[in-house]
Amino acid sequence: MPSEFDIAAIRSILRECTEYEPGHHLGRPFMSAYQIAIRFADRFPSHHLVQTLPVGGEGTGQNHSLAQSIARFLSQAIQERRALDIEGGFLSHDQIGQLNFTTISDGEEVRVSTLHTKPGHSIFRCVA
């Protein structure tokens, strides 16, 4: 089976975040695992995980998603020091009632399904 993801492909998605203001004292913006998954699905529609998993969100009827797979992959890569230029973290769910994203290909709404889980919402950014 081919490797889950190419770190270079995900790194390029993080580096091309449109809200980046070069030289800003807070650095590059973070992207949620959902945002990365949406961009990944748009760029690599024939990838085996894009073909078999939903981006994620409420109402998919599945417990496993592309966003979850990407978050796990990046977390492991950071922990194993294979992605020294990528930072991860969590966005607190405190006082968030709803969090939605929109797919690129068809404008479909993706409603975050993890708002009531303990760790918060996975976010990542490329620091270089």
Image (spheres, helix red, strand yellow):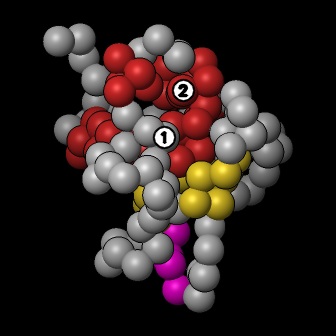
Q: Which residues are magenta?
A: 90-94
Q: Nearer the viewer, residue 63 or 35?
A: 63
Tell me if residue 99 is in the magenta stretch. Answer: no
Circles 1 and 2, Cβ within 8 Å, touching? The answer is yes
Other-residue count near label 1 (Cα within 10 Å), few / some / many at <14 / 14–19 / ≥20? many
User: Measured from the top left, where is residue 11 in percent x and y?
Assistant: 51, 27
Tell me the amino acid under the disc marked 2: Ala
Q: Is residue 23 above or below residue 93?
A: above
List the residue tagged with mark 2.
Answer: 41
List the residue tagged with mark 1.
Answer: 55
Q: CA distance from mark 1 to mark 2?
A: 8 Å
Relative to 109, 37 lies left or right = left
Relative to 19, 82 lies left or right = left
Relative to 125, 101 lies left or right = right
Q: Nearer the viewer, residue 87 or 123?
A: 123
Q: Is residue 126 visible?
A: no
User: Measured from the top left, where is residue 43 in percent x and y?
Assistant: 60, 18
- Image point 20% across, 38% down: which residue? 80
Q: Is residue 121 visible?
A: yes
